[in-house]
Amino acid sequence: MDDALAAFERVCRAFTEPRFYPHPVTAVQRIDTHISAVFLTGQWVYKLKKPVDFGFLDFTDLEARCRFCHREVALNRRFSRGVYEKVVEVRRGHSGILSLDGPGELVECAVLMKQLPADRSLQALVASGALEEAQCRALGERLAAFYAQAERNEEIRRFGTLTVIRRNVLENFEQTEPFVESVLDAEKWHLVRNVNEAFMEAHKDLFDGRLGDDRICDGHGDLRSEHVYFLDDGLQIIDAIEFNDRFRFGDAAADLAFLHMDLDARGAFPQSLIVLDAYVRRARDASFYRVVDFYACYRAMVRVKVSCLRLQELNEEKGKGPNGEESGRCRSQAAQYLELAYTYAVTMTRPTLYVFCGLPASGKSYHAERLTQAFRMALFQSDAVRREVFPESFKAVPEKSAYGAGLYRKERRRLVYSHLLNQAHEELKERRSVVLDATFAEKKWREEALRLAQDHDAAFIIVECRCSRETLEKRLAARGEAPTLSDARLHHLPHFLKEYEPLDEPFPASSHTVCHTEGDPEDIFYRLLASLYAMQCFQARSRLEQSR
């Protein structure tokens, strides 16, 4: 290995000389990673693979290094246009002089790509505060379009199975466990591990649903802000992983969660929410928000692992020179990423009580049902509870009774809401999120729902569905005499309007949202999803901040 690295360094020395290149070069900058040596020449970049073996990759063989160079070019052309030029060969002539694509013995290969302006990277735009909403939306839409066309086959699908997901997730904890106490906060590390294990145990149906929705594909594998560029001629994304397929294969949500986590770590969480919203709307990926924190937590733990392993390498190299500054940076990064993983774990483990309220025919049942289908949660509806509590009152054709009579008598409504909240209590007691769907016309029942969430230390989100009176009348008139779960009809509307108490109570921050339901139901639903996720995150992070 030492001989191979020495030979590699001799090749690298040639790349530091401007006269080595077949094009004008005034200065050369070398950048090293643990697996590559990169040479920036102003117009072009040359990327060489180091002869190293880390288990998850093996570049010790020249043939393998050349093969992976070609693989890198092919894979990254999926995300970019005109950036990845070709693979160049370093050859040694009879006189021992090295040249690019010249005669003689092949000694190395390198990827040749255009040098992109550093100040146009997503990382630079975030740092300078210059990132615009339109750019975030363009990125989310571009990724949605890519994932829709990405390769899918049975081997790739296997990486979306819970068996493989569990193995990948637990591997992070196995490899970081030796650093608990000495580098990593033990309490947070254990909580993150326990939450991940519990989430996988409780949500097999969610992961199976992602498989069924065909969300497993050949992605990028290393989607970070430093690999995304906004240029005058459009978006360019570089540096997809070529050396190990399993790092690219998986849920599109796992791929995008890496970028989400990276932006979050850089203080750009609001901008990341815009990227996610654009992706979800374009991809029509309704269950994405249910898994993104899980995958962001996984990605954060990958970064914890990388920082810890690099710290271990530095400790083993103490005799080779000073490394105190880099060691300190590794410790700091490991702590930062563990804190992020902890934040995602807290967010995904805290149950939420969703209350969909509003006048009859305001659209609350439609969106409540869509949410529960996407997130695979329990749904309890007042109309269904009413039939359950008073089965003898059910009629195939709704009665034309006056408002406040029959099933809607006040004492019966009181029993329905009590039963509804009790069903929610049983779910929250088991730390499961739940959706309630009812008019919640009286303030006291909304207050009871909030109190229930607080008693269970659950997040609380009330979705108030609204539309114009004209729309309400049209929707109720369309029900006619046909049997429906709800008995509310057009002649009841004036009474509902009169008795409906406005939602003017002081709800906790980020607990109340208004959903205007006139327009395309699909677009409305996906806008609502983005709003709900942002509210959940705000509540979780505010709670964490208060506990610090």
Image (cartoon, rainbow, N blue to C red):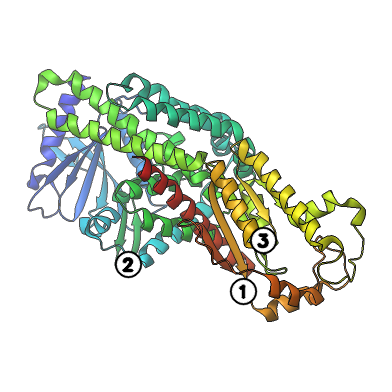
**Residue designated by label 1:** 519
Circle nearer the viewer, 3 or 2: 3
Neighbour class for label 1 at 10 Å: few (<14), some, many (≥20)?
few
The mark found on residue 440 in the picture is: 3
Residue drawn at x 21%, y 49% is 45
Residue drawn at x 48%, y 28% is 194
The mark found on residue 233 in the picture is: 2
Instruction: Provide the secondary structure element on which disc 1 rests.
Output: loop
Neighbour class for label 3 at 10 Å: few (<14), some, many (≥20)?
many
| Residue 100 seen by the camera | yes
Instruction: Provide the secondary structure element on which disc 2 rests.
Output: loop
The mark found on residue 403 in the picture is: none
Residue drawn at x 62%, y 52% is 448
Dividing the picture into quadrants, the one containing residue 171 is top left
Where is residue 230 drawn, in percent x and y? 31, 61
3D distance between C-alphas at marks 3 and 2: 52 Å
3D distance between C-alphas at marks 2 and 1: 34 Å
* Kind of residue at badge 1: Gly
**357 shown above or below 455:** below
Where is residue 545 drawn, in percent x and y? 36, 45
Q: Quadrant of the C terminus?
A: top left
Whichever of callouts 3 and 2 sits on the residue coming sooner in the sequence is 2
| Residue 243 seen by the camera | no
